[in-house]
Amino acid sequence: MAFLANTKVKLASLLAALLIFSTPFAYAGEGVFGWVYTLDIQPKGKWEFEQKVDRSVGQASGSYALDQFRSEIEYGLTDDIQIAAYVNMFNVHANRNYINPDFCPNVNPCTAGFGVPGSYNDTAQGYNSFGGVDGYSGEIIWRITNPLTSPVGVGIYFEPTIGKLQDSIEARLMLQSNFLDDKLILAGNLSFEAEKEHYTPGEDEIIRQSHTDILYGASYRFAPNWSGGLEGRLHNDFYGYHLDEHIQFANFIGPNVHYAAKDFWVTAAWRYQIHGVCMGAGTGDCNSVYDKVSDDHGRNQFIVRVGVPF
C-alpha cells in the first residue's frame, strides 16, 4: 500500500510538472515579430525591459556590417497607452564595400555606407568604429481598438530620436487582427520617418531625408510557448523631409521565431533584400551588377529581441 501511495504521489508530481512546462505563457507587451510592431502593449502600471540587437551585413563587395543595439524600458501609462525610453548604441565595419563608379570615382571598390565618414569614399581603407552610445529615443503607443475584442486592432505610434548618426521623428499606423483563438496574428505598420543624417559623425555636414515603409507579418503559435511566421518590408527613401525626391526602393522578406518562458520572452528574425532600386540623386547606393540598395542596408538583416517583464 505504501508503495502504491508513493507511486501515486510521484505520478501526480510528474503530471503537475508536465502541465507547468507545457502551459503556453503569454504576456502583454510580448513581441512576436522582429520589426513589425503589434498592439500587445503593457497594461497599466506594468514595466518591461527589452534589449534589441540588429545586424545588417553584406553589400556589393568586400565586407560591411552595421550593428545597432537598443535598450528599452516600457511602462503601461494606461491599459491602452504605453510609453518607453531607449538608449541606442552602434558599431560599424566597412571595407571596400562600394563598387558604383559614381560613388567611387578615384578608388574602386571604395569604403562607404551609413556611419562611415565621407572622407573614406576616396580611399581603399577599411573602417571600424564602435560608436558607443549613439543617442536616445522616446516612444508612445496609443491603442485605439484592441485586436482581442475588435475584428481589427488600430493604434498610433510616435518616436523621436536624438543621436550622433541621425536625429529623426517616426510615426506609424499600426493594424492587427487575431484569429484561431489568438494563435494566428496578422499585423501591419504604415510608417513615415523624417531624419537629419550626420553624413560625417561629429561634423556639420548633414543629409535631410524621409522614409515610408510598409511592414507586414504573420505569426502562428504552433506549439506551447512557440510561435513562428514570416514578415516583410517595402522600403522607400526620399531626399528632403517631405518626400521631395524618390531615391530608393527595397523589398525585404524573411522568417521569424518566438519563444515565451515564465519570466522572459525572446524573438529572432531574419529578412533578405530580394530586390533594390536606386534612382535620381541616389544612384550612388546601387550599381548595374548589384541589384540591392546599400547605404545602411545589406543583403541580410538579423534581429534578436529579449523581453523581461517586471
Image (cartoon, rainbow, N blue to C red):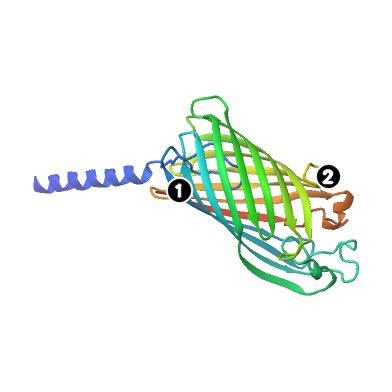
Quarter in which the N terminus is drawn = top left
Check the image and report above or below for 110 versus 22: below
Q: Are marks 1 and 2 in contact (CB under 8 Å)?
A: no
Lower sequence index among marks 1 and 2: 1
As helix, strand or loop, the secondary structure at mark 2 comes to strand
Name which residue type carries label 1.
Glu
Tell me the residue at 80%/70% (across/down).
120
Dot 1: what SS?
strand
Q: Name the amino acid type tagged 2.
A: His
> Looking at the picture, does residue 190 appear above or below residue 84?
above
Residue at label 2?
246
Q: Which residue is drawn at 72% across and 64% down?
A: 201
Q: In this view, does 64 lie to the left or right of 175?
A: right
Q: Nearer the viewer, residue 220 or 27?
A: 27
Give the residue number, with chain letter if any, for mark 1: 48
Disc 1 versus disc 2: distance between alpha carbons? 38 Å
Residue 171 % position (x, y): 65, 40
Q: Position of residue 53 (x, y in %)?
A: 57, 57
